[in-house]
């Protein structure tokens, strides 16, 4: 896309976002510890139509931050096709994770964290805010979700 192309409609951007959530495998996950030290990693994820599901060890910085902080910022794309998702996080041990979520994660990624190690957990991210844009001319209408409600 070039800046000379017209901006996408909010409805088109939302549909493209939903398509990407189904298609993409990796997502950037930004968290912070209690002192505010940031941590940024890429994790596999799956989208169930309402939530993003992640998995990582409870014992690493990202797992601790997700569990203790209960918030994360997720990102897809590069600087010319950005998706930012701010969400609240719930932690599920491998015994607690809903079966449908674990099956969906396995189907998408080919990996079953529950069989890997007891230190792995699942993290359900409920989007509270979603922004998408390509180039500066889409910035004014970049918000697709606010306060957990789609505005498109």
Image: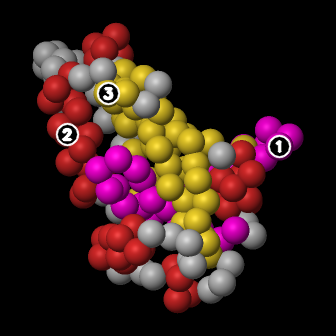
Q: Is residue 150 visible?
A: yes
Picture disc at residue 16: 2
Residue closest to the far right: 35
Q: Quadrant of residue 76?
A: top left
Span of residues in magenta? 33-58
Tell me which numbered mark, 3 or 1, is placed earlier along the sequence.
1
Kindly check if marks 2 and 1 are in contact, taking CB atoms under 8 A apart as contact: no
- The residue pinned by badge 1 equals 34
Q: Is residue 119 above or below residue 14?
A: below
Secondary structure of the residue carrying numbered label 1: loop
| Above-or-below relation of 36 to 25 | above
List the residue tagged with mark 3: 150
- Sequence-first disc among 2 and 3: 2
Judge from the rendering whether residue 112 lies leftward or rightward of residue 94; answer left or right: left
Residue 54 percent location from the top left of the image: 49, 61
Q: If you read the primary sequence from the N terminus, does the residue marked by circle 2 or circle 1 appear first?
A: 2
**Residue 35's x, y, as percent?**
86, 40
| The residue positioned farthest toward the top in the image shown | 140
**What secondary structure characterizes most of the magenta part?**
strand
Marks 2 and 3: CB-CB under 8 Å? no
Residue 18: horizontal and vertical position, in percent?
Answer: 24, 44
Figure quadrant of the C terminus: top left
Q: Magenta stretch: residue 43 in it?
A: yes
Observer-nearest of 32 and 71: 71
Q: Please, which residue is most extreme toward the bottom here?
A: 115
């Amino acid at each position: 896309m070039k800046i000379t192309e017209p901006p996408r409609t909010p409805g088109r951007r939302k549909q493209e976002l939903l398509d990407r959530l189904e298609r993409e495998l990796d997502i950037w996950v930004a968290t912070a510890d209690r002192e505010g030290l940031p941590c940024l990693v890429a994790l596999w994820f799956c989208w169930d139509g309402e939530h993003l599901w992640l998995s990582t060890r409870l014992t690493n910085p990202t797992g601790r931050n997700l569990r203790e902080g209960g918030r994360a910022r997720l990102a897809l794309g590069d600087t010319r096709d950005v998706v930012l998702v701010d969400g609240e996080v719930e932690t599920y041990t491998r015994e607690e994770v809903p079966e449908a979520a674990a099956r969906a994660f396995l189907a998408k990624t080919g990996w079953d964290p529950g069989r890997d190690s007891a230190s792995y957990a699942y993290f359900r991210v409920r989007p509270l805010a979603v922004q998408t844009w390509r180039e500066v001319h889409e910035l004014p209408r970049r918000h697709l979700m606010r306060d957990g409600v789609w505005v498109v």
